[in-house]
Amino acid sequence: MAGDRSDHRVLQYEQSLMYGRYTQELGVYAKEEATRLKESEKKVSQPSRTLEHDDGCCAKFGPFRWLKFLISLIGEDWIFFFLLGLFMGLTSWAMELGIIMLQKGQKWIYGRLDSNGFLQYLGWVGYSVALIMFSAGFTQIVSPQAAGSGISEMKTILRGVLLKEYLTFRTFVAKVISLAFALGSGMPLGKEAPFVHIASLCGALLSKLPVFRGIYENESRYREMLAAACAVGVGCVLAAPVGGVLFSIEVTFTFFAVRSYWRGFFSVTIAAFFFRVLAVWYKDEETVTALFRTHFQVDFPFDLKEIPAFAFLGIISGFGGALFVYLNRRIAQFIKKQKLFNTFLMKKCLVYPVMVTFLISSLLFPSGFGQFMAGELTQNEALVTLLDNRTWTKDGIAEEFDYIGNARVWMHPQVTVFGTLALFTIMRFWMCALAITMPVPYGAFMPVLVIGAGLGRLVGECMAFWFPDGIHTGHAIYPIVPGGYAVVGAAALSGAVSHSFSTVVMVLELTGQISHLLPALIAVVLANLVAQSLQPSIYDSIIKIKKLPYLPELGWGQHEVYNIRVEDIMVRDVQYITLSCSYRDLLNILMKSRLKALPLLKSAESMILLGSIERAQLQSLLSQQLSRARRLQCIKERGAEEKTILSTESNPPSNNNSSLQTGQEEGHIQITNEELHPPPVVERPTDLSNSSQDESGVTLRSIFCASSDAEEVQDDRDVQDPTSEITDWEARQLDERVNFNNCKINPALIQLLECTSLHKTYTIFSLLGLDHAYVTRIGRLIGVVSIKELRKAIDGSMTLKGVKVAPPMATFRNSSLSSSQNETTYLQAVRPPEEHANDAPKHVC
């Protein structure tokens, strides 16, 4: 073996005339070296195995071994993302089926009670209220983390911040069941954003299966898996693979790894395929087609003279998207500012969703106010009618409503089509902004898509009214297609609310036609231009409302981010530890700060940054230094020293070597006899305490007088150290110097220069997912910048055109408790629980 290693050349190094070169790739060498080390370990640890033992092992662990071998042969990622897409396709189809059944149940109750209008109203409203109550109650009982959108939280998780209990099985069950009942209630809610969360939950749970265990334990690979899962969540709901992947990248990432591209496309294709195939198998569809198929004319879908109308629709959608985000945030902030009302809602969590549902369902009641805004239709039915390629009005009079089915609800004898569409758009607009503040799983994409389609249909019908004979192009006359305006409006408003351009691709995949690609692109670009200059996206707005640790996006045309430097926003009063610090210094720093990691310096004079140590590591060092095991070990050592002194005094050394050897043998025999028959303890004063005897009459030294293991354990269990001795001993231990030999130090820190611009700092934090970064000058620590300081600086540059430097934003300081109280509390925390009974007086923190 040694000869083989001597002839083995690392990376196949070849020596030429002037210099050498490596002819083997690093990856190939790493694989060969790993295989060699693994085989050598097997030879050392398992020298031989019988055939009979191998057969028994295969019989016991055979299935998993062969399954893991098959997975490794095909590829872990391929198998994993195929299963993820399959499961999400089944989940989406099953949920869609359940939602349709619940919505039909509401219409069935409404139809059965047609003889009594008041009972109809009670049945319509009570059905929605009951489903929302169950959804909100089930969410609060099983997993409160299931409430809300999902995209906002996933943006935070993909940035590296792990939200507690957000990717667990309990949250998965609560999200799926609560979402089905919430959407079945008829409220203007969507399921696209919640399915992003559901797909991430499926990915996280699948990665914990025995066959995939250990594959996605790496943090970077785990994030790549979650990124692909987010794309699956969008694509499997709308059956839009390409648009789903692009949309998930736009709304969840600032920087996306291209190597994860194929994972998302592969998995979302599998999910969308099974979602549509199951619909055909269940006889809901004749074949696999678009989810909202349209029948626009392809040869001449629109005229170039209509481009200004599409551009105007995009601008209006931009203002509408910004207004929607602003209205939703103002509603949420208003509820939070009302302290009494907010406290009441926290105690009675079902009151607020019941109030909102009662209001919205009452307005949507078909025999009441809902008859003026198509309140009878569900969101899918409304979108299908709005995308119809026929013109509903001619000279302001509705025609052929009986021919186009559900479109008859847009006709009312007292209101024109224009009034119905305008009322539908306005009412649905604020209803959706209000509904997504309820503590249930919700999405805003589908409701906004329907509202945008209504706005576009209104513009299209107006164009058809102004040009009843169509647009004259040469000798041909082409009529206006209001359904095309509905497609453009849906893409524009949804893009303005989410700050994304991929909604063009998603809407075109939903309709199954690409005829209106150019006007949709123009409208979406203009809508984003207006919306992004006024308000953040709906997902970033929710992040601000929930105060999640995430960086806001940099606005357009903000030149201040290039002029502001790190030295203007960094915290200069940094808490740190040095190599020569004592445990008392470490205790004081841990009490004053709540940092996850502390910088380690060479000395306070040089301020040279050596690395950082996590808070858990420092707490472990302090806990070990003050632990009961260490204290008993010190008592043992002191007792052994006293025992050696006593034996030396009783047996003085002799000049004769033979007599010395005899004395040693006698001493050995005497110790053995003491082990068998322990002598009575002689009380002697020790250095540990003035009073060497505790309440039970046993001295501290007597704990270790007997050498028997059983007697030592019994003595350790029975003896209670006096409080004063423990306090004195802890004081001596805290004055000792900290030993960092057994502590994990991270030397590879991201360091910034004081002249680094705010824009570059933002890019580094977003790209690497940093929580904080240290600012150094020639290797010396001069400050620190965290995500909080960076977020305040970005907000300040956008609003005040500058950053307030004084007083510094001291996020890293927390002096809410006094030093003495903190020290007492921390000492109680690091002591074992059984020692708290000895403390006098007793204190409960």
Image (tube, grey):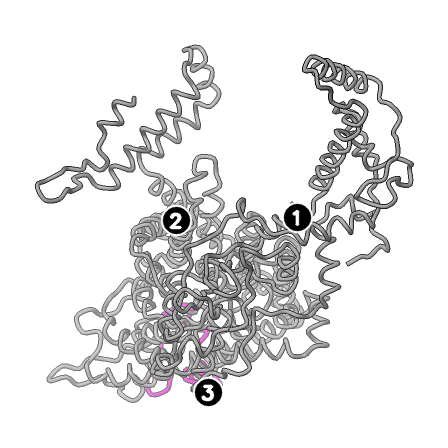
Three-letter amino acid code at the position of disc 3: Leu
Left or right side of 395 for 152: right
Along the viewing direction, whichever of 700 and 356 lies nearer the viewer: 700
Question: Which residue, given by chain and number where applicable, does mark 2 sit on?
Answer: 221
Q: Which residues are magenta?
A: 393-422
Whole-percent x, y for residue 294 in the image = 30, 66
**C-alpha gap between disc 1 and disc 3:** 47 Å
Kind of residue sitting beneath label 1: Ser
Q: Residues within 10 Å of mark 2 (few under 14, many from 20)?
A: few
Q: How many numbered marks appear?
A: 3
Q: Earlier in the sequence, mark 3 or mark 2?
A: 2
The percent position of residue 821, horizontal first and vertical second, equals 75, 63
Kindly identify the residue that appears in the image at 76 percent across and 31 percent down: 645
Residue 239 falls left or right of residue 100: left
Sequence-first tag of 1 and 3: 1
Question: Quadrant of the rendered structure where residue 816 is?
Answer: bottom right
Drawn side of residue 276 relative to residue 132, left or right: left
Task: Classify mark 2: helix, strand or loop.
Answer: helix
Secondary structure of the residue carrying numbered label 3: loop
Looking at the image, is mark 3 or mark 2 nearer the viewer?
3
Q: Quadrant of the N terminus?
A: top left
Residue denoted by label 3: 800
The part of the image, by quadrant, that contains residue 303 is bottom left
In this rendering, the label closer to the viewer, 2 or 1: 1
Q: Which residue is mark 1?
A: 623
Task: Give me the disc on residue 5.
Answer: none
282 in magenta: no
Looking at the rendering, which quadrant does residue 6 occupy? top left
Q: Residue at x 41, y 14 (%)?
A: 48
